[in-house]
Image (cartoon, grey):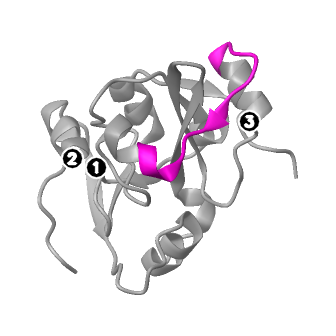
Amino acid sequence: MTKHVKTNAVRLLEAAGVPHETLTYETGDGGIDAVAVAGKLGRPPGDLFKTLVARAGRNVYVFCVPGDRELDLKKAARAAGEKKIELVAVKELPALTGYVRGACSPLGMKKSYPLFIDAAAESREEIVISGGALGLQISLAPADLFRVAGAAAADLTAAD
C-alpha cells in the first residue's frame, strides 16, 4: 500500500485525538466511485459513505450517504430547511471544497458547510469516508465523525 501525505481530513482527526485508520487503494484503473472503492478495500459498499455537495441558491450543503444508496434530493432539501436543492457540478468541487471528485472528504474542506450524514451511520460501529485524496479512505466511529464535523443525522436516501 502506498503511503499518503497527510490531508486536511487526517490532520483534523489527529488534532482532535479521534481514533481512526487510514486505508489506501489503487486508483490507476479509474474506479473511484464508492462501490468500486469498497471492492478494492474488500468492504461492503454500505460501509463507505460517499460525500456529496449540493446547493440551494447561494447556500452550500454537504451530505454523506452509504455508497450503495442514492441521495434523495427532496429529503436532503428537507434536512437543510430548503425548498429545493441540487448537486453542484463536478467542476465546482475544487473551488468550493478544495477536493476533487472521488476524494471529497466531509472533513477539512476549504470552508465549513452544514453537514448531514444519513441516519444509517448511527447504527454502525464504524464507517469509511474519503480521506481527502484519491486512493485514501478513513475508517472511524460515526459518533466521532458527527462530533468533530458538527454534523446532523437525517434520513437522506431514497426508499428501496
Is residue 66 shown in magenta?
Answer: no
At 52% from the left and 19% from the top, the residue drawn is: 59
Q: Which mark is residue 157?
A: none
Q: Mark 1 points at which residue?
A: 20
Q: What residue type is labelled 2?
A: Val
Looking at the image, is mark 3 or mark 1 earlier in the sequence?
A: 1
Residues tagged 2 and 1 counted as in contact (Cβ below 8 A): yes
Tell me the SS state at disc 3: helix
Where are the magenta residues, as a range? 80-92
Q: Mark 3 points at which residue?
A: 73
Q: How crowded is mark 3: few (under 14 residues within 10 Å), some or many (20 or more)?
A: some
The N terminus lies in quadrant: bottom left
Residue 25 position, x and y percent, is 34, 76
At 88% from the left and 53% from the top, the residue drawn is: 160
Report the mark closest to the observer, 3 or 1.
3
Residue 143 position, x and y percent, is 44, 32
In the image, 127 versus 159, the foreground residue is 159
In the image, 126 versus 83, the foreground residue is 83
Q: In the shown orientation, is residue 27 left or right of residue 79?
A: left
Q: Residue 10 carries which label?
A: 2
Q: How far apart are marks 3 and 2 (CA)?
A: 29 Å
At 44% from the left and 80% from the top, the residue drawn is: 30
Q: Distance between the residues labelled 3 and 1?
A: 30 Å
